[in-house]
Image: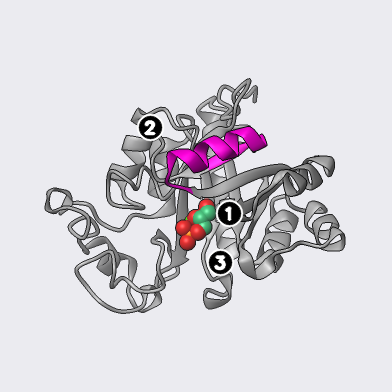
Amino acid sequence: TVSAFSPYKAEGPMIIAHRGASGYAPENTMAAFELAERLGADFIELDIRMSKDGELVIIHDKTVDRTTDKTGYVHDFTLRELQGMDAGSFFDAKYANETIVTLEEVMYAFGGKIGILIEIKDPQLYPGIEGKLAKTVRRYELIQDIAGIGAHDSVQIQSFDFESMRRMHTLLPDIPVAVLINADQHPLTDETLDKLASYASSINVSHDLLDEDLVREIHDRNRKVMAWTIRKDQDMERMKELGVDGIITDYPA
Ligand code: G3P
Ligand code: CA
C-alpha cells in the first residue's frame, strides 16, 4: 500500500501529545486524544497495561486510584469493569463520561489521522503483553491496508524496559521502537548507545538530561531523539535549539 499518511513533517520537531492533550483534558482518554488531533499534534502518546481478562487498556498508573472513581490494581479488573469507571472527573467534573478505553478503540478511531506512540508500562507485570500488542498492531495494519490507508511509521512503541523493546523489535521488525531514558540510565556509555541503536529507531530522553553532546551521539548513530515531558515554554525553546526530532508535551498547542 502506498502510504497515504505519514506523521513526519518536512521540518521542525514532531509534536507528540503526552497522554493525549493532557494539559487541557483528562490524560489517556478519548477527550484528550480528540483534542490533540484538533490541535494538530503529529502523534498522541499513550500508556498501555493489561486487564484481568487480558485486554490492552490505556492507563498510566498501576492502579486506578489516581485517575478514576475506583481503587485497586488494573490487572485485578476485567475490561468491562474498567470501561465502567469514571476516568474524567479527577480532572474536571465536566469529563465525568470519559472512561478507560482500549488500545484497539483508539487505534481505529485515530489511525490514519494522527500517529500513535504506544508506551508499554511495567511489561514484567503483564506476561505476554508484547505478543498481544504485536497481534493488535498486525490486525490494525491489515485493516488499514484494506481501507487503503497506509500508515508508514504512524505506529511506534516505547518503554523504559529495554529488554521488552528488544523483544518488540523482533516481533515487529518494521515498526519503530524507542527506549525511554531517565536519570537511572544516565549517563549512557558508548557501548550502551550502540546496543540500543541495534534495535531502537529512537532514543527518547528526559529533557533535563539532554545536551548537545547526547543529541549528537544519538544522531551520529542515525537514530532519532525525542524529548519528554515538556511543560514550559523555555524547555520547549531549548529542545528546538538542540535539534531534537520530537517533543513530547502535555501542551501540544
Ligand atoms: O513519553 C515519555 C513519558 O510518557 C514517560 O513518562 O511517566 O509520563 O509515562 P510517563
Ligand atoms: Ca508515557
First to last magenta residue range: 230-247
In three-dimensional space, the C-alpha distance between marks 2 and 3, rounded to whole angstroms, equals 33 Å
- The x and y percentages for residue 129 are 56, 66
Q: Residue at x 33, y 54 (%)?
A: 101
Whether the residue under disc 3 has CB within 8 Å of ligand 2: no
Q: Residue at x 38, y 55 (%)?
A: 102
**Residue 78 in the image: above or below residue 144:** below
Based on the picture, tell me whether residue 113 belongs to the magenta stretch.
no
- Residue type of the residue flagged with mark 1: Asp
- The x and y percentages for residue 223 are 76, 43
**Number of the front mark, 1 or 2:** 1
- Residue type of the residue flagged with mark 2: Ala
Q: Is residue 192 left or right of residue 154?
A: right
Q: Residue at x 55, y 25 (%)?
A: 5
Q: Is residue 199 left or right of residue 53?
A: right
Whether the residue under disc 1 has CB within 8 Å of ligand 1: no
N-term mark: 2 or 3: 3
Residue 253's tag is 2
Label 1 belongs to which residue? 208
- Mark 3: secondary structure: helix
Give the crowd class for mark 1: few <14, some 14-19, many >=20 residues within 10 Å: some
**Residue 243 in the image: above or below residue 24:** above
- The x and y percentages for residue 117 are 53, 46
Label 3 belongs to which residue? 129
Q: Is residue 62 left or right of residue 4?
A: left
